[in-house]
Amino acid sequence: MDTKTVTINGLRISYQEQGSGRPVVFVHGNSCSRKDFSKQMQSDLAANYRLIVPDLPGHGESDWARPVTEKDYWASYLTDFLVEFCRRLDCDDAVLVGYSYGGHLALETIPQLPTLRGAVVIGAPPLGNPPRMEDAFLPGPVIEVAFSANVTDDDITRRNRAILSDGVPVPDHYAEDFKRTDPRVRGNLGPCVLSGGLLDEVEIVKKLQFPLAIVHGESDSLVSLDYMKSLNLPNLWQGDIRVIAGCGHPVQWEQPEIFNALLGQYLADLEK
């Protein structure tokens, strides 16, 4: 699969594309890359859908934000990018699939792209405004490192081990992706959240015109399932959160066959 580039807001953005049909845009998480969706891009989903996955600004092979500003990589910065990316690639009627912070970005992009067909979020609890961070997220190395611009190799190792369920090998690209990420991504995330830089994602979900699929790993060490259930969200696909047994935070990586089947079913349901 060839890697392509597109220039958006002066930044060279790296992405991959496979298949044809209804576009599906995958959005990776904080300090990750498009590689987290490689098991989807190489799947049979490409037989029926146009699969697209970018490296977000500051991540993977994409350029870092410039010129330097205090609000680089805030949620609004990245959602503005996603809107322009979808428009430039003629996929503003896409289904967004967001993992971790990418799930929050997918939710926050929805109001700006009213023609979106659907959304799937993995390991991303919808947050209100102000966000109940202490309820939505579990304490530990994953949340600690997520907000730290300066991290050690030991920090990265602990974080990478913690997001996976027991016995699952840490992918080779995890540490590489983390080290290639602009440190401002993590350093500016805290100020964004604490300064009200997130939209009210709970209200966004309540107003959706399509069913939202929320996928959660049973052994996720970052996200609280109890918090998500307490929201009593309407418009959930098949009426509930889909919990995948024996799986950690990156469901799409640990259980690709199960996740790809769920995604395929969701996409088919949207076309009915």
Image: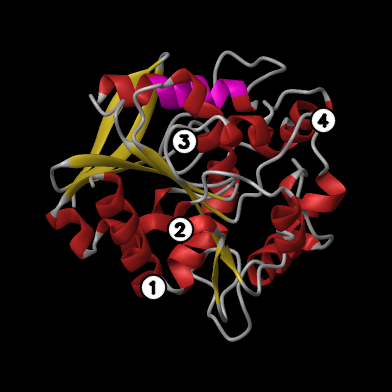
**Left or right position of 146 against 260:** right
Q: Is residue 187 above or below residue 156?
A: above
- CA distance for labels 3 and 2: 30 Å
Identify the amino acid type marked 2. Answer: Gln
Q: Main secondary structure of the magenta part?
A: helix
Q: Which residues are magenta?
A: 76-83
Q: Is residue 33 left or right of residue 156?
A: left
The reply to whether the magenta stretch includes residue 168 is no
- Callout 2: helix, strand or loop? helix
x and y percent of residue 176 in the render?
A: 52, 56
Q: Earlier in the sequence, mark 3 or mark 4?
A: 3
The answer to whether residue 79 is magenta is yes
Residues at marks 1 and 4, CA–CA distance in whole angstroms: 34 Å
Where is residue 74? Give x, y as percent. 65, 26
Residue under pointer 2: 238
Q: Earlier in the sequence, mark 4 or mark 2?
A: 4
Work out how far the residue at label 3 is from the one at label 1, CA to CA, in angstroms: 26 Å
**Residue occupied by mark 4:** 130
Q: Is residue 268 left or right of residue 11?
A: left
Per the image, the residue denoted by label 1 is 258
Residue at 72% x, 34% y: name it: 189
| Crowding near the residue tagged with mark 3, few <14, some 14–19, many ≥20 C-alpha atoms within 10 Å | many
